Amino acid sequence: MDLGLTNLKVLVTAASRGLGAATARRFSLEGAQVAICSRDQGHIEAAAERIQNETGQQVLPLTADVSDPDDARTIVNRAAEALKGLDILITNAGGPPAGTFEAVSPESWEQSVRLTLLSAVNLIQAALPYLRKSDHAAILTLTSYSAKQPIPGLVLSNSLRAAVIGLTKTLANELGPDGIRVNSIMPGWTLTERVEELMTARAAQKGTTIADEIQAQVAAIPLRRMARPEEFANVAVFLCSPAASYVHGAMIPVDGGAIQAAL
Ligand code: NAD
């Protein structure tokens, strides 16, 4: 199927590795013009080069901390100016720190609100003037299955992902009449670098192997494995593409069947 992405202009934030990088790569493979960002200039340039070498398409690397409102607005403007417009925005950021309610400090709450919720708000606000000029405008927020089913010890993610879902649904109502589609993906366990690091740390702590730790984590997932980042990216790219032109206001789990909440 032709997804209709050739030459569409895309910004994927927090994309030097993991889900963001896999998504940017897939967009580039589909012929889109892609800009990516992360906080570290060397890492984001290396990621852009890796994608370019594989796809033969230029990828624009930008440096920004999306939890900083000025950075978030600036990279949207820089991406849109360089690409001469913007059709698709994927809001991604690093995950908020782990912790139970009583362990998380007020400062950590505030920083995590900036990282997880306000980054999406600021990026989308800055992108709207460009998206309104597009015939294929789409926004995808990257959240987590923790929005549907709280994960023990992750009070920040559990709370703030649900807030981003509320934002996404509200925007679907408010922007739908203008032809701007808004959706979210709630990923489940996906074997990115971050998760590999987490499993490695757990194995070292318990004296087990990484394979043991992954196995323990996936025991309750019907597909009995973690996703590959490409499996997330395939859904993300489809949802943002003109091929999904009537998919709007959808909160799509990509979680191997982990959450089977009521319809
Ligand atoms: P990752 O750590 O592998 O990659 C995160 C990327 O974000 C990196 O490129 C990093 O440089 C960048 N980044 C982090 N903070 C940033 C900031 N403030 N500004 C700009 N760039 C920033 O993580 P991942 O596994 O790809 O996860 C991506 C997001 O998806 C996270 O929010 C994570 O919590 C969420 N998530 C991941 C999973 C999973 O299993 N991998 C599941 C559910 C939700």
Image (cartoon, grey):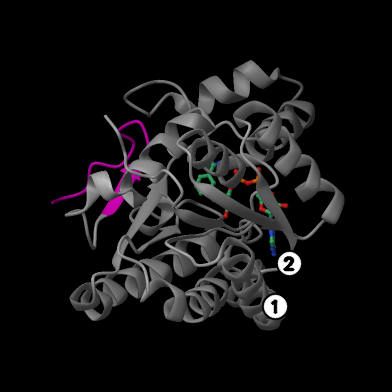
Q: In this view, does 39 lie to the left or right of 132?
A: right
Estimate the spatial distance between the alpha carbons at disc 2 and disc 1, rounded to whole Å: 8 Å
Q: Position of residue 63 (x, y in %)?
A: 76, 62
How many numbered marks does the figure carry? 2
Q: Please, is residue 11 above or below residue 160 in the view?
A: above
Residue at label 1? 68
Q: What stretch is highlighted in magenta?
A: 251-263
Residue situated in front as seen by the camera: 66 or 25: 25
Which image quadrant is residue 40 in?
bottom right
| Helix, strand or loop under label 1 | loop
Residue that appears at 57% across and 68% down? 80
Q: Position of residue 224 (x, y in %)?
A: 40, 20
Residue lying farthest left? 263
Q: Please, is residue 98 above or below residue 201 in the view?
A: below
Residue situated in front as seen by the camera: 159 or 64: 64
| Helix, strand or loop under label 2 | loop
Residue at label 2? 64
Disc 2 within 8 angstroms of ligand 1 (CB): yes
Q: Determine whether label 2 and label 1 are within 8 Å by CB.
A: yes
Quadrant where the image shows the N terminus: top left
Residue situated in front as seen by the camera: 220 or 148: 148
Residue that appears at 65% across and 81% down? 69
